[in-house]
Amino acid sequence: MTVTEGSVATSGPGPSLVRLDGVGKDFRTIAGGSLRALDGVDLAVRRGEFVCLVGASGSGKSTLLSLIAGLSAPSRGTVLLDGAPVTGPGPDRGLVLQSGAVYPWRTVERNVAFGLELLPVSRAERARRVAWYLAETGLTGLRHALPKQLSGGQRQRVAIARALACEPRVLLLDEPFGALDVQTKEDMQLFVRRVWADTGTTVVMVTHDVEEAVFLGQRVVVLASDPGRLAADLPVQLPPDRDGTPRDLAVKRLPEFLTLRAEVEDQVRAYHQRHAATGSGG
Ligand code: ADP
Ligand code: MG
């Protein structure tokens, strides 16, 4: 476990924006038993930080994100946003899933405006934000297109633009590039990192792709399975991030990158194997 104070390039150490204290989540199973999906999770995310969550399938990554999103309530412990308990979903948290839910009958522009239509913002402000986030996400030329005319990567850009247009305090991404081919995925990685740098937004992103986590995150948090809990919290300090220039894909070939990637992979695997060895499923 490593403390990462001081490793944040954009915001510096500050108070936690998202804070989980002793969080546990149990689910009732069909057989009438109880499944401990998360246990004793303490996690703090600072304003402006980019945190990636990795872990084996079933380690509770999506459960953790849905607790921050307010889509479910913890069985134990507290989830705080800016010091206030999370009591439900809200426009201050933008959630994007693997199959970015875009409305097929709405144009790109109207999809991006969707969340804003539910907020008390003026028409002029709505138009301004839609135009800005379309440009930011490279979708201006496609604003009148319908989702069926878009590629998978473009549809995910629409979902991300829609979440960002509400200017949430935290952007929550659950395996947003999991369904994309490698080339598109790398384009999207560069895209999301640039959006993060441009907007200063806080990002918590779940991925099962360790390379993606190390490339994108300022911190990589590893979850262990059964019950889901924090196994490691590793800072990512790669040269291009330290001198302020944007990180590019060549970083993935640096020795420091490969070492950290191997370390995270070992952590994920160690907990997965221990889990498998106990014969408790997997
Ligand atoms: P991950 O996203 O890391 O793959 P999840 O958070 O989806 O893991 O799930 C963690 C555990 O909780 C799994 O064992 C999963 O089957 C269980 N689980 C998740 N959601 C529910 C639910 N709504 N009801 C019952 N069990 C659930
Ligand atoms: Mg999941």
Image (cartoon, rainbow, N blue to C red):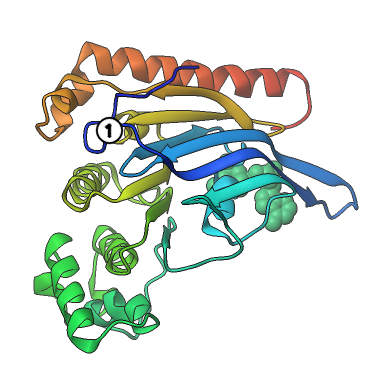
Compared to residue 55, the image places residue 143 above or below, namely below
Considering depth in this image, is 131 or 250 the residue closer to the camera? 131
Q: Quadrant of residue 58?
A: top right
Compared to residue 28, the image places residue 141 above or below, namely below
Compared to residue 18, the image places residue 44 above or below, namely above
Expressed as whole percent of the image width and height from the top left, the position of residue 223 reads 56, 31
Task: Name the residue furthest right.
Answer: 32
Q: Is residue 208 visible?
A: no
Q: Residue at x 24, y 69 (%)?
A: 150
Expressed as whole percent of the image width and height from the top left, the position of residue 226 reads 71, 32
Q: Is residue 23 visible?
A: yes
Q: Which residue type carries mark 1?
A: Gly
Residue 192 shown left or right of residue 89 in the figure: left
Q: Is mark 1 within 8 Å of ligand 1?
A: no
Expressed as whole percent of the image width and height from the top left, the position of residue 14 reads 36, 36
Q: Quadrant of residue 274?
A: top right
Expressed as whole percent of the image width and height from the top left, the position of residue 128 reads 15, 77
Q: Residue at x 11, y 71 (%)?
A: 140
Compared to residue 185, the image places residue 147 above or below, namely below
Considering depth in this image, is 170 or 57 the residue closer to the camera? 170
